[in-house]
Amino acid sequence: MQQRTNVQSKPDRQVVEGECRSDVFLCDTNSANMSACECGCEHYVRSCLLKAPCCGKFYVCRLCHDDVEDHQMDRFRVTEVKCSLCDTVQQSQQMCEKCRVAFGEYYCSICHLFDKDKKQYHCLPCGICRIGPKENYFHCEKCNLCLASNLRGNHKCVPDVSRQNCPVCLEDIHTSRTGAHVLPCGHLLHQTCFDYMHKMGGYRCPLCMHSAWNMKHCWEEMDKQISETPMPSEYQGITVKVYWARGGRGTGKPDDDDVG
């Protein structure tokens, strides 16, 4: 069962802890339940370190672990954490059992995720936590992915689409902390990869070559330019047969949204 607690930071003093990536902690020592420390790493704000079940080492998060180790850390198998304030090793939980500091404003007991409150929620079908708020998203059973509410009944389903790697950077999409962009064809790219593709002049899906945008106005402009460009007299009346090959689709004609 997912647990979620919101607490407010009350900075009072600074404590330095060498093992934490950001080594500065701001906590209220006079409070019965001390608020979450403003510390962690470049990925998450949290005041504990996770004990990697694979190698037994302590890291602020699984991503910090994966950056320096030759193997990946399974977040779901984490059972122990170490408080960054008092160094107490204990079972994974919301509050430190010794100094009562909150390890994170948001905590998921399934993913063992500690972080600032970003309206996160745990999606059981996805199997991981998503940044919400939850009411702004829905889980598409066919795509097997959480999508923005405005895409409900307004997108092309591709079965298990997020379980494929991004066709631009070839890295995982489903568990990535980078948001995904849904193309009209239903395929996914990292939002940053889509922006880069756009910047470089790419306008087709790297997987199926369908247009990434509505190309109607582009085709209208091309038709206008062609109509305003007279055919040289020596070529007038000459016709050429063009065979359109699209991966064995056999229609002989491009789709309305295809890019030739």
Image (tube, grey):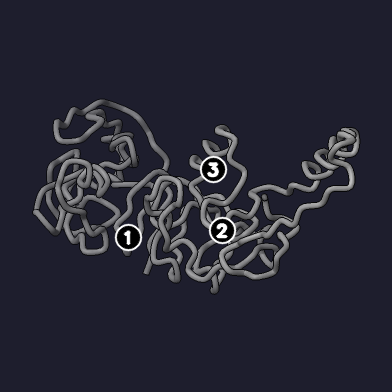
Nearest the viewer among 129 and 208 is: 208
Counting from the top left corner in percent of width and height, residue 77 is at 21, 64
The residue carrying mark 1 is 111
Residue 194 is tagged as 3
Counting from the top left corner in percent of width and height, residue 171 is at 37, 50
Nearest the viewer among 40 and 90 is: 40
| Disc 2 to disc 3: CB gap under 8 Å | no
How many angstroms separate mark 2 from mark 3 (CA)?
Answer: 15 Å
Relative to 170, residue 157 above or below: below
At x 14% / y 59%, what residue is drawn? Answer: 53
Q: Secondary structure at mark 1?
A: loop
Counting from the top left corner in percent of width and height, residue 162 is at 46, 61
Check the picture and name the quadrant holding the N terminus: bottom left
The residue carrying mark 2 is 208
How many angstroms separate mark 2 from mark 1 (CA)?
Answer: 34 Å
Q: Look at discs 2 and 1 and give the one toward the viewer.
A: 2
Hey, what amino acid is under mark 3?
Phe
Q: Is 52 on the left or on the right of 173, as rendered?
A: left
Hey, what amino acid is under mark 2?
Cys
Hey, what amino acid is under mark 1?
Cys
> How many neighbours does mark 2 have within 10 angstroms: few (below 14), some (14-19), or many (20 or more)?
few
At x 54% / y 43%, what residue is drawn? Answer: 194
Which residue in the rendered view is the most extreme toward the bottom? 141
Q: Look at discs 2 and 3 and give the one toward the viewer.
A: 2
